[in-house]
Image (spheres, rainbow, N blue to C red):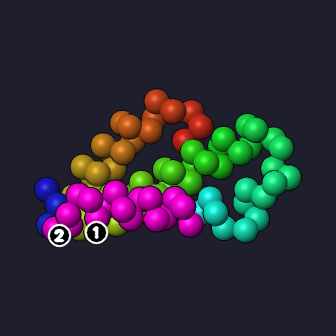
Amino acid sequence: MCDLFQVDIGKIAMLCHLYESLVTEAGPLDKTFTDKIRMKNFLCQSFVFSAIWSLGGNITESGRDMVDIALRDIFDEHPDAR
């Protein structure tokens, strides 16, 4: 199990802050981003990145495999998340 304690709401807040910083940064989603498929992929991959770092960022070596398996189970069903 995980050796470091973090309040669950802290993980969700971190996920939201990371995701917001990625999608509001000037450039990636400017108003000329007309290719909806690329935009959808960018948004999905940004969410996956944010989830991995916020939910697994403070996991120690002993908990990494468990978090890896759980996140893969969640995101493997979504082709845009790859």
* Magenta-span inclusion, residue 8: yes
Q: Is residue 62 visible?
A: no
Residue at position x 59%, y 37% in the image: 80
- Residue 37, position in %: x, y? 73, 37
Tell me the quarter of the picture where residue 35 sits. Answer: top right
Question: Camera-side residue: 16 or 70?
Answer: 16
Q: Earlier in the sequence, mark 1 or mark 2?
A: 2
Q: Residues within 10 Å of mark 2 (few under 14, many from 20)?
A: few
- For disc 1, the marked residue is 58
Residue at position x 39%, y 41% in the image: 72
Q: The residue tagged with tag 1: helix, strand or loop?
A: loop
* Numbered range of the magenta stretch: 5-21
The correct choice, above or below, for 58 with respect to 16 in the image is below
Is there a contact, CB below 8 Å, between mark 1 and mark 2? yes
In three-dimensional space, the C-alpha distance between marks 1 and 2, rounded to whole angstroms, equals 7 Å
Q: The residue tagged with tag 2: helix, strand or loop?
A: loop
- Residue 19, position in %: x, y? 52, 59
Q: What residue type is disc 2 on?
A: Leu
Q: Quadrant of the N terminus?
A: bottom left
Q: Is residue 26 visible?
A: yes
Q: Please state the total of marks drawn on the protein image.
A: 2
Q: Quadrant of the C terminus?
A: top right
Tell me the quarter of the picture where residue 76 sits. Answer: top left
Q: Main secondary structure of the magenta part?
A: helix
- Residue 16, position in %: x, y? 44, 59
Q: Which mark is residue 4?
A: 2
Furthest toward the top, the residue is 77
Q: Residues within 10 Å of mark 1 (few under 14, many from 20)?
A: some
Q: Which mark is residue 18?
A: none
Q: What residue type is disc 1 on?
A: Asn
